[in-house]
Image (cartoon, rainbow, N blue to C red):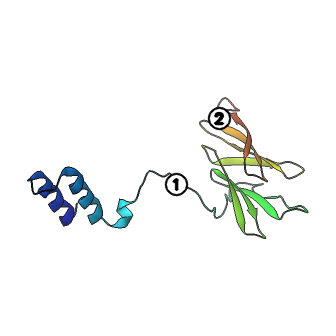
Amino acid sequence: MDLAADTAHQNAGQGHGMDAAAAEDASLSARPSALAEDHTQALSLKWSFGFNKNRTGVVHNLSDDSRNAIFYFAAHTGVVYDYVNRTQTLLQGHCNPISCCAVSADKRWVATADQGPDSMIVVWDTLSGAPIKTIFNPHLDGA
C-alpha cells in the first residue's frame, strides 16, 4: 500500500472525519490506473500466431469461389484464416491441445479432436465459426 492510501486508512481508523468507504475510495484513487481496473473479465484471444510444427496435416485449404481461406490448429484453438482480408475466426472449446483434424469435401465443415483427460471431438461450421456437434470422451483412455 502506498503512503496516500496508508494515511487514508489511518485517518479513517482515528476518527479524522473519514469513514471506511471514503478511506477505500482514497486508497483506490491513490493506485495507478492499471491496478484499479476491473479484473473480473476473462482473457479473450484475439489472434493466433503460428501452428504446431510437430503435427502433420495441420493446414487445410478452404478456398473456393466464395472465399480465400485456410484452416490450421495451434494448441487448443482451430483457426480459419482469410488470407485476402487478413482476418481470423478462432474456433475455441478444447480442453487439451488439438491433435488432429479433418475437413469435409465441400470445405464447410471441420472436425477437430484432442487427446488426454476430458478428450473431445468437435464439428465446426467454418463459415460461422460455430461448434455444431461435440462428442465428449470419444475413447475410454483419452487417446
The C terminus is located in which quarter? top right
Front residue of 33 and 116: 33
Quarter-of-image position of residue 39: bottom left
- Residue 25, percent across and down? 27, 58
Vertically, is 106 above or below 50?
above
Type of amino acid under label 1: Leu
Give the quadrant of residue 86: bottom right
Determine the residue positioned at 78% across, 52% down. Answer: 126
> Which disc is residue 142 wearing?
2
As drawn, 86 above or below 105: below
Q: How far apart are marks 2 and 1 (CA)?
A: 27 Å
Looking at the rendered structure, which numbered label has been put on residue 43?
A: 1
Q: Which residue is nearer to you in this view: 93 or 38?
A: 38
Between disc 2 and disc 1, the foreground one is 1
Q: Position of residue 130 (x, y in %)?
A: 72, 47
In this rendering, the answer to whether 128 lies above or below 136 is below
Kindly tell me whether residue 16 is visible in this rendering. yes
Q: Is mark 2 on a helix, strand or loop?
A: loop
| Local SS, label 1 | loop
